[in-house]
Amino acid sequence: GDVRGGGGAGGRGGPGGRGGGQAATPPTPPMQRAAADTTPIKSRDEWKRKVMALVDEWLELKSEEEAELTFTELRPRGKPGEAADNMVEFALEKVMENCKNDGERLGVAQLLIIMINSGNLAPVNFDGPVYMSAVEYLSDLVIDIPTIFSNLAIVLAELIKIDVV
């Protein structure tokens, strides 16, 4: 047969082929991020959705670069410090209420530590969520989530190790 070097689409529909007249498929362009949404985030529900999406994406991809980029895009959409405070509050809420297992809880702790090390979060961002929200409501939540103390302890232990809480 005809043996030529090089790639090319070849075969059905490609150059020299006798397919159904379809054009060769162009190469897939590299992943590109859509332009960042700059609409101000006005509600707690919207902050919660955005933070939960960031955490879920982190748990799936484990990409520090992607997580930091996503967070950096959220920051200007709120008041100063609002993105960081919401990041901590809703990440801890996920840990307490709806992580599938301890591996996911440790993954959330890892994400928070990455955000601290990159300067996106500071210990002050943990004061309200940890001491007021989480600890204050634990006794109410334990009725619905019997493992809530151990769920939270997994993440707090990691944060204590690096002297954040």
Image: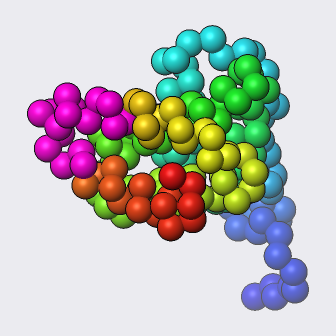
Nearest the viewer among 35 and 7 is 35
Which quadrant holds residue 40? top right
Nearest the viewer among 130 and 148 is 130
Which residue extends farthest right? 5
- Quarter occupied by the N terminus: bottom right
Q: Is residue 18 left or right of residue 48?
A: right
Is residue 51 in view?
A: no
Image coordinates for residue 22, horizontal then vertical, percent: 74, 47
Which quadrant holds residue 62? bottom right
Is residue 157 in view?
A: yes
Image coordinates for residue 4, horizontal then vertical, percent: 86, 85
What is the chief secondary structure element of the magenta stretch?
Answer: helix
Image coordinates for residue 101, horizontal then vertical, percent: 29, 57
Q: Is residue 163 above or below residue 131?
A: below
Which quadrant holds residue 15? bottom right
Image coordinates for residue 56, horizontal then vertical, percent: 49, 45
Residue at 81 percent of width and 52 percent of height: 29
Residue at 66 percent of width and 26 percent of height: 82
Colour mode of the rendering = rainbow
Q: Is residue 23 left or right of residue 55?
A: right
Span colored in magenta = 134-149
Q: Is residue 108 above or below residue 2?
A: above
**Does the magenta-highlighted stretch encompass residue 141?**
yes
Q: Is residue 141 above or below residue 39?
A: below
**Does the magenta-highlighted stretch encompass residue 133?**
no
Residue at 42 percent of width and 31 percent of height: 132
Q: Is residue 157 left or right of residue 8?
A: left
